[in-house]
Amino acid sequence: MPGAERVSGAERVDGAEGASGPDLHRQLDRYLRHLAIERGRSPHTVAAYRRDIEAMLGAGTTLDAGSLAGYVRGLREREEPLAASSVARTISSIRGFCAFLVDEGVLQVDPSEDLTAPKLPARLPKALTIEQVEALLAATDGEEPAALRDKALLELLYATGARISEAVALNVDDLIGEDGTAEVVRLFGKGGKQRIVPVGSYARSAIDAYLVRARPVFSVRGTSTPALFLGVRGARLSRQNAWLLLRAAAERAHLDVAISPHSMRHSFATHLLQGGADVRVVQELLGHASVATTQIYTRVTADALRDVYVTSHPRAR
């Protein structure tokens, strides 16, 4: 593996034999560095893997098939069993760690290959209606610098399907177009994967207004930064503050639905498919590696069509 140090024979572990606590914790540190540096995993993901694997090692589990199966069985059968989603994540963490140790020559065989994760029900994303999105965006109307920024951010989220983390990571130079107009935007997704997404006219207008009348007000309050969206002190807007301003806009709009950081992204995908967009196009716009991830939105639109049919057709019920 490029860039990863090889282990000596003294550190080789065959199943449970020779697997001392310090050895495995040292290997875990190497694995987490690999996830962060070579695989580009987020700090949140790396922290979750650390918790899962340290809990397994702390329970005295050894790296052999029987011990791992017993540990997973215990998660399901204890007095307060873990939720199926937590068990599935734990198994994923263990599998990743074991696969890394096999690749590094620390383990000769993968003791986790027979672990079976519980089948999770498909969780349908919650999308806002078009009317709810319009109310949310209208709640950011105003001429104050903060209002202009909030309008630009929310319009961009809905126009491009960007994750909040992708939007706050944008620099001014990521807006691409003639005469300074943001015709497309360059987004950087998970693992630094780049994609180019068109920007609609409403978002373009909101971004132009923000760049001319609001961003200069914020920028003079801080040190020079290429960040597109700035906080009141002139620094890059944080993901947490972006989420807070989204929630505040939802409260002003009196929306009676739960708003999550992904609400605009889910709404973007759902409304495109309802409008007849091809699922492969939506996949590209969202930056999904697999079309299977995008196809969950087709279930949302199919459910909506079925509801309309049942309530509208005289012989549907």
Image (cartoon, helix red, strand yellow):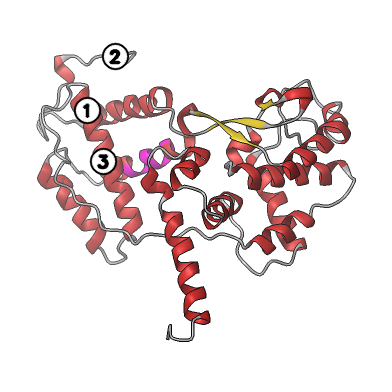
Quick one: 260 or 52, which is closer to the camera?
A: 260
Residue 154 sits inside the magenta stretch: no
Helix, strand or loop status at disc 2: loop
Q: Are marks 1 and 2 in contact (CB under 8 Å)?
A: no
Residue 47 sits inside the magenta stretch: yes
Mark 1 highlights which residue? 101
Separation (CA) of disc 3 from disc 2 = 21 Å
Q: Main secondary structure of the magenta part?
A: helix
Query: Neighbour class for label 1 at 10 Å: few (<14), some, many (≥20)?
Result: many
Q: Position of residue 12 (x, y in %)?
A: 15, 22
Q: Residue at left 75%, top 45%?
A: 202
Q: Residue at left 86%, top 31%?
A: 212
Q: Amino acid at mark 3?
A: Ile
Image quarter in which the C terminus is found? bottom left
38 relative position to 129: left or right = left
* Mark 3 or mark 2: whose residue is earlier in sequence: 2
Helix, strand or loop status at disc 3: helix
Separation (CA) of disc 1 from disc 3 = 11 Å
Which stretch appears magenta?
Answer: 46-52
Mark 3 highlights which residue? 94
